[in-house]
Image (spheres, rainbow, N blue to C red):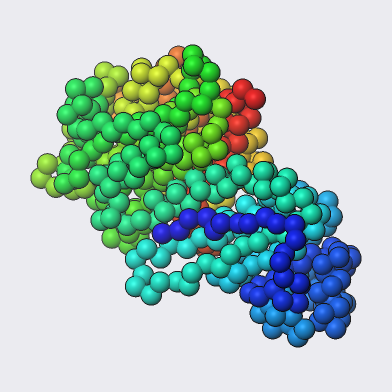
Amino acid sequence: MSAPTPIRFTRYDPKSLAEIEGHLAIVVTPEGTMDQAARSANRLTKGAVARLIASDSFAKAKTGQVVTLAWPAGLAAEALHVLVLPRRLDQATARKAGAKLAEARGSAALTVKAGNMTRAADLSLGIALRGYSFDAHKSAKSDELGEVVICHNKPEEIEAAYQPLQAVAEGVHMTRNLVNEPANVLTTTEFASRLADMTKIGLEVEVLEEAELEKLGMRTLLCVGQGSASPSKVVVMKWNGGAKDAAPLALVGKGVVFDTGGISLKPAAGMEDMTMDMGGAGVVAGTMRALALRKAKANVVGLVGLVENMPSGTAIRPGDVVTSMKGDTVEIINTDAEGRLVLCDVLWYAQERFKPAGVIDLATLTGAIIIGLGHDNAGVFSNDDTLCNAFLKAAAQEDEGAWRMPLGQSYDDQLKSNIADMKNVGGRPAGSITAAQFLQRFIQEGTPWIHLDIAGVASVKSNTSYAPKGATGWGVMALNRLVQDTYEDL
Ligand code: BES
Ligand code: MN
Ligand code: ZN
């Protein structure tokens, strides 16, 4: 399992440039201008940096790229990374450059000669985000990560700016660890216990067991887990960093630890990917972790529905009718449309108990959103333009793709049932929208709400800018930013 690499900030390194071991990084502008450290590296390597700047590969190198000199003569370092960065840096460029550096260094120790770099904290966040590997289940343990040292002319300033970003990196790593974990390890019980562990960082955590859920009337949630040997649970995480009487923001996550489809069984090919079907709950957990670690001045409550969707003699059947906590009845047409059944009860419970100022749910809800938006954007559905625009802005600022989708009466009409208040599926057309319409039926009048369908972005099959293939942690940064910008009384 992985945690963000510790990063040390210092003004003077105890060693001279020539003596620094491991990997060394210097900065050169796209025009080829060297700063002080780059000039000394150039002197020590007898002009290798200048030759690199004059080369074709440098001419082709774009802003944010890393060009590496291996085993540079004149230096103790094994590798000299030349970071191509302009003097004026934006946040995303700095983070991506950090991520590139993290990739280039592998597990070697890394010293970055950042000089006066603005955004050195963002460069550090990039290093922390990209420096991730999930090797909990490999017998050959990967090499211990070497130290990262950022040499900067104002180290205290950069370190202070990095502190809340490190909290975010911790949250992202937690989400990835949960999403990457196989379902035989991350059972509902194990998931709940990892969340309960977060009392150590100041969260209040409650675990609601099946008997309590039954008492509350959460039959739609419970019916999803009734074919599994693992007990269904709802976990409530509270962070009270804001004013005593301020209504909280509620984050609600789908936590299906494995989705076989149930009696409406999924095909075998690719079913192993359904270990990530707790991705929404994973993002809620990681966000709560980030908020607690940086002591956010806001009230936020995270709720996750933890269940396993299995076929068995006790499983729910197509055609069955169940009653939700709200009281509405649902005809189960397809047991594989289980996420909405879990969420509708948790959404209702969250509103009844917390009277939240806003509700944001996250779920790997539909394959249809992958057809619509691929792996670059999550689907965003909302009944409130103000909240929705604030979220879209936060996501854009954090470089997390998000695209708003429509809602509307005619989509809702697709959910009409002959024998109950609604069906749990609306047919093939607009599958992601009818899923969102199903959820909206459980949102109370006047409650601002966003539904994020993260089926395409929670886990991907190739490397992204900030993560190796597998779980991305998408959403932790955007939600953290949203809380910071719209809920914190600063
Ligand atoms: N967990 C799946 C959605 C999903 C698909 C997530 C691919 C990640 C990758 C969800 O529970 C599901 O099975 N949805 C069905 C709904 C259908 C039966 C209406 C789907 O998308 O096919
Ligand atoms: Mn399903
Ligand atoms: Zn599912």
x and y percentages locating residue 361 in the rendered image: 44, 33
Report the residue at 25% width, 44% height from top.
189
Q: Is residue 219 above or below residue 227?
A: above
Task: Farthest residue to the front: give it.
Answer: 14
Q: For residue 392, which quarter of the picture?
A: top right
Q: Is residue 111 above or below residue 436?
A: below
User: Looking at the figure, which quarter contains the N terminus?
Assistant: bottom left
x and y percentages locating residue 82 in the rendered image: 76, 70
Report the residue at 28% width, 55% height from top.
185
Q: For residue 400, which quarter of the picture?
A: top right
Is any part of residue 438 visible from this angle? Answer: no
Q: Is residue 408 above or below residue 30?
A: above
User: Looking at the figure, which quarter contains the C terminus?
Assistant: top right
The front one of 248 and 56 is 248
The front one of 110 and 11 is 11
x and y percentages locating residue 476 in the rendered image: 52, 42
Q: How many marks?
A: 0
x and y percentages locating residue 358 in the rendered image: 50, 23
The front one of 409 and 90 is 90
Q: Is residue 27 above or below residue 398?
A: below
Report the residue at 34% width, 28% height from top.
346
Q: Is residue 249 left or right of residue 186?
A: right
Task: Farthest residue to the bottom: give it.
Answer: 73
Q: For residue 223, which quarter of the picture?
A: top left
Report the residue at 56% width, 56% height from top.
6
Is any part of residue 72 visible from this angle? Answer: yes
